Image (cartoon, helix red, strand yellow):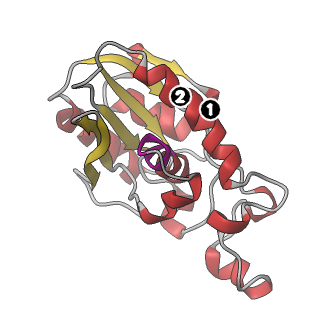
Amino acid sequence: MANQVVVLVRHGETEWSRDGRHTGKTDIPLTDGGRRQAKALGAELSAWQFALVLTSPLARARDTCTLAGYGKDAHVRPELVEWDYGRYEGLTSKQIAVTNPEWSLWRDGGPGGEKAADVGRRVDRVIAEVRGVDGDVLIFAHGHVLRVLASRWLGEAPEDGRHYSLQTAAVSVLGSEHRDPVIRHWNQTPASGAQDG
């Protein structure tokens, strides 16, 4: 659909995102601050009418969706779960650097978990579904998987998601211009949030 927009929402703050710990499949709840961020998203998102709402199955994304006012309309997609960090799950980048100072998630992936290409294949399925929808789409998920989704929306390699930083409770908007996929807005936050996780 030529004028379709896809609104991406990263979940609200968790204890691990606040502390900079890599949070993949571990089902960490929102902090009180994260719940406040999620509620604040409702007003931000009210400018659109969504034909489809999708969410990651993990509680931090589903709860953000519900607190923002879209829980009743949301469809869970396992493809939207966060990057599997493998043995680096729960560690900070600083902790990882002690034993593996040259490590890059985007280049090397999570040891025993996923590489960027694995995440890219998952989000490609979501993008195919979204592009078949007649209307705007809202997606609640996680920092790294949404960064890969944005890069794949633009036709870039999954690894190029490294260029698209996302804060917690950030709203980003994908669309098109003259049939070219574009980023209309990126990493806009109605409330302040943490950087990683």
Q: In this view, does 20 lie above or below 164?
A: below
Q: Is residue 85 above or below residue 37?
A: below
The front one of 29 and 11 is 11
- Give coordinates of residue 166: x percent, y percent: 40, 58
What's drawn in magenta, residue-wise? 149-154
- Residue 135 in which image quadrant: top left
- Residue with the mark numbered 1: 79
- Residue furthest to the right: 112
Q: Could you say which disc has been placed on residue 126 in the image?
A: 2
Q: How far apart are marks 2 and 1 (CA)?
A: 7 Å
- Residue 27 in which image quadrant: top right
* First-in-chain label (2 vs 1): 1
User: Would you say 197 lies left or right of 132 here?
Assistant: right
Residue under the image location 36 percent in, 31 percent down: 67
Q: Is mark 1 on a helix, strand or loop?
A: helix
Q: Is residue 115 above or below residue 194?
A: above
Is residue 39 in view from this perspective? no
- What main secondary structure does the magenta stretch of the protein show? helix
Q: Is residue 105 above or below residue 149?
A: below
- Residue 77 in which image quadrant: top right
Dot 2 crowding, Cα within 10 Å, few <14, some 14–19, many 20+: some
Q: Are marks 2 and 1 in contact (CB under 8 Å)?
A: yes
- Residue furthest to the left: 47
